[in-house]
Image (cartoon, helix red, strand yellow):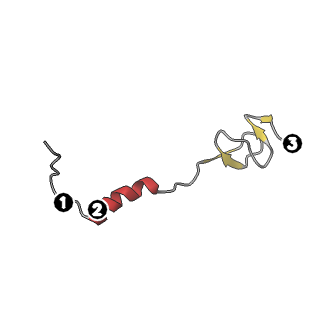
Amino acid sequence: MSICPKGKISKSRRDKRRAQTWKISLPSLVPCGKCGALAKSHRMCKACGSYNRKVIFS
């Protein structure tokens, strides 16, 4: 027995659905706990060099 689709799906409809997986979203930025500058979550702050309120990079 073979697969029997319910109806034809046009190329534009198929491609619109596929395009959703390639969307680029902006990174979520959170304020640094030490200096208040915006940084990516769970990453070292580039402004003051701290992570989790500890100085990692001077």
Q: Nearer the viewer, residue 43 or 18?
A: 18
Q: Secondary structure at mark 1?
A: loop
Of marks 2 and 1, which one's residue comes earlier in the chain? 1
In this view, the mark in front (2 or 1): 1
For image coordinates 15% across by 45% down, the residue present is 2
On the image, the x and y values in percent for residue 53 come to: 76, 35
Picture residue at 58% right of the left edge, 48% below the top: 28
Q: Is residue 35 left or right of residue 29?
A: right
Quarter of the rendering containing residue 56: top right
Q: Quadrant of residue 43?
A: top right
**13 in relation to 58, above or below:** below
The residue pinned by badge 2 equals 13
* C-alpha separation, residue under disc 2 versus residue under disc 3: 52 Å
- Tell me what residue is drawn at x 78 percent, y 49 percent: 47
Q: Residue 8: name its quadrant.
A: bottom left
Marker disc for residue 8: 1
Outermost residue on the bottom side: it is 12
Residue that mark 3 sits on: 58
Mark 2 and mark 3 residues within 8 Å of each other at the beta carbon:
no
Q: CA distance from mark 2 to mark 1?
A: 10 Å
Q: Are marks 1 and 3 in contact (CB under 8 Å)?
A: no
